[in-house]
Image: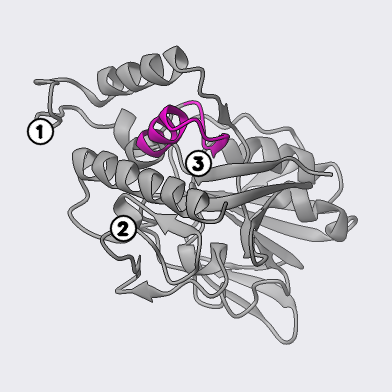
């Protein structure tokens, strides 16, 4: 039987970290999902001047301070990508690759996804379009597959899928060196539209079309509406009240995903509010 956590936090930026710290202080059994860089947006910041207590620091320096804080508190970041969250009544099920986690409450702190869905992406979701290549790779054994990659983490998934697919196209949406095996074909072009009838059959790029039976869109985060079925959005952000509660009981949100301003200090404050109200929600159910 799966361990059931008190609070599951999705995202390791300032909102997620603040939520984790405050949940831990309140003696709750927490689990946090994210990556070792905490937040790609944070580490790329050349200067941060408006974070209380830190004057004229780089994003990397602020990240190091965050890492020291969570390490001192014994908070671990689980480096797995949550691809779906399902409300099960009095708990939530979180899907990550071939694993499943359970938690009494969830705090979504995934940041703001600034890339709009490709044309056809949402239409073919589950019918050839997916967000976790390692989860669904066995379905595409011996088939042509395309990965649209927005980060370097996608390279590991591409190498895995290439061992099963008959042909794998890798479309990088970022610059840099690529650690890919010889079976992966790198296509430097811009994706425009995913095409097909009942299932995906092609992807149209700016300069060409590729025949493909599967398209994986690998981003830093999945849009909230696709991550949590039934979640209410407002102007592409998660709709929350002053307690950072969403329309789904036991589900909270914090940070950029709840709306402007997109500021680290605002995100950290909302993470605290979300965690404290998640704690109150759990205690009210005893």
Foreground label between 1 and 3: 1
Report the residue marked by disc 3: 151
Q: Earlier in the sequence, mark 2 or mark 3?
A: 3
Q: Nearer the viewer, residue 221 or 140?
A: 221
Q: Nearer the viewer, residue 263 or 104?
A: 104
Q: Is residue 256 above or below residue 228?
A: above
- Separation of disc 2 and disc 3 at Cα? 33 Å
Q: Is residue 148 above or below residue 208?
A: above
Badge 2 density bin: few <14, some 14–19, many ≥20, Cα 10 Å: some
Residue drawn at (60%, 80%) of the image: 123
Residue drawn at (46%, 54%) of the image: 281
> Residue 209, position in %: x, y?
61, 70
Foreground label between 2 and 3: 2
Report the residue marked by disc 1: 50
Query: Is residue 14 left or right of 199 when viewed as pictured?
Result: left
Q: Nearer the viewer, residue 27 or 79?
A: 27
Q: Which residues are magenta?
A: 17-36
Q: Quadrant of residue 37?
A: top left
């Amino acid at each position: 039987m799966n361990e059931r956590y008190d609070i599951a936090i999705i995202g390791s930026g300032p909102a997620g970290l603040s939520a984790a710290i405050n949940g831990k202080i309140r003696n709750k059994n927490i689990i946090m999902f994210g990556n070792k860089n905490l937040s790609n947006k944070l580490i790329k910041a050349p200067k941060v001047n408006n974070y209380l207590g830190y004057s004229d620091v780089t994003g990397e320096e602020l990240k190091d301070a965050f890492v020291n804080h969570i390490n001192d508190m014994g908070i671990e970041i689980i480096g797995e990508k949550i691809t779906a969250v399902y409300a099960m009544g009095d708990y939530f099920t979180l899907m990550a690759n071939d694993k499943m986690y359970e938690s009494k409450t969830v705090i979504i702190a995934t940041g703001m996804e600034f890339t709009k869905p490709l044309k056809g992406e949402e239409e073919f979701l589950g019918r050839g379009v997916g967000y976790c290549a390692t989860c669904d790779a066995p379905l595409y054994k011996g088939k042509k597959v395309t990965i649209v990659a927005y980060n370097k983490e996608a390279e590991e998934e591409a190498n895995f899928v290439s061992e099963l697919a008959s042909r794998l196209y890798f479309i990088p949406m970022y610059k840099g060196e690529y650690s890919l095996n010889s079976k992966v074909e790198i296509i430097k072009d811009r994706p425009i539209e995913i095409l097909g009838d009942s299932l995906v059959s092609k992807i149209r790029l700016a300069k060409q079309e590729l025949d493909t039976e599967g398209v994986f869109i690998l981003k830093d985060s999945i849009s909230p509406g696709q991550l949590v079925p039934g979640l209410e959005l407002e102007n592409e952000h998660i709709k929350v009240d002053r307690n950072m509660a969403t329309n789904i009981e036991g589900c909270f949100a914090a940070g950029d995903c709840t709306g402007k301003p997109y500021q680290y200090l605002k995100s950290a404050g909302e993470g605290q509010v979300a965690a404290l109200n998640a704690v109150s929600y759990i205690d009210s159910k005893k």
